[in-house]
C-alpha cells in the first residue's frame, strides 16, 4: 500500500465520519417535527412541554424562543412509541406504552 493510497483511505474515512456526525446532530424545528410525524404543530408543542420529546432553545434572549429538536432524539421518541398489534380481523388489541386504541 502506497502512502497516497493510505492517505486516500484515511480521507474517505474522515469524510464518512463527518457525514455521520452531521446527520446524527441535525436539528429540526417544531414544524419540521410535525411534518415528519404527520401531526399538528400544537401537538408537537404539547410533547415538548410535557417532556416527551427533548427540546433545546437557541434564542439569544428569553423573549426570542427558537426551539430545536435533535433528529436522534426524535428517532428515540419514535422507537419508544412502537407498539405491538395483536388480534384478529375486526378485533385489534394494541399492546404498548401510551396506546389508547381501545
Image (cartoon, helix red, strand yellow):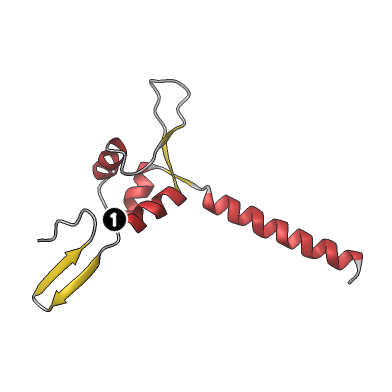
Residue shown at 21% from the left, 70% from the top: 85
Q: Which residue was labeled with disc 1?
A: 38
**In the drawing, does residue 86 fall left or right of residue 56?**
left
Number of numbered discs visible in the structure rendering: 1
In percent of width and height, residue 88 lies at: 12, 78
In percent of width and height, residue 93 lies at: 14, 68
**In the drawing, does residue 67 fall left or right of residue 14?**
left
Pick out the residue farthest to the top.
Answer: 62
Q: Residue 41's image quarter?
A: top left
Frontmost residue, 98 versus 6: 98
Seen in the picture, residue 5 relative to 18 is either above or below; the reply is below
Frontmost residue, 41 versus 14: 14
The secondary structure type at the circle numbered 1 is: loop
In percent of width and height, residue 55 lies at: 39, 38
Residue shown at 8% from the left, 76% from the top: 90
In percent of width and height, residue 35 lies at: 33, 52
**In the drawing, does residue 84 fall left or right of residue 78?**
left
Seen in the picture, residue 25 relative to 48 is either above or below; the reply is below
Amino acid at each position: 500500500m502506497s502512502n497516497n493510497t493510505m492517505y486516500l483511505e484515511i480521507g474517505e474515512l474522515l469524510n464518512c465520519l463527518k457525514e455521520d456526525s452531521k446527520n446524527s446532530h441535525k436539528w429540526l424545528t417544531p414544524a419540521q417535527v410535525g411534518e415528519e410525524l404527520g401531526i399538528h404543530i400544537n401537538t408537537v408543542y404539547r410533547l415538548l412541554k410535557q417532556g416527551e420529546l427533548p427540546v433545546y432553545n437557541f434564542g439569544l434572549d428569553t423573549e426570542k424562543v427558537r426551539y430545536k429538536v435533535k433528529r436522534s432524539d426524535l428517532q428515540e421518541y419514535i422507537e419508544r412509541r412502537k407498539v405491538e398489534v395483536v388480534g384478529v380481523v375486526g378485533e385489534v388489541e394494541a399492546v404498548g406504552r401510551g396506546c389508547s386504541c381501545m
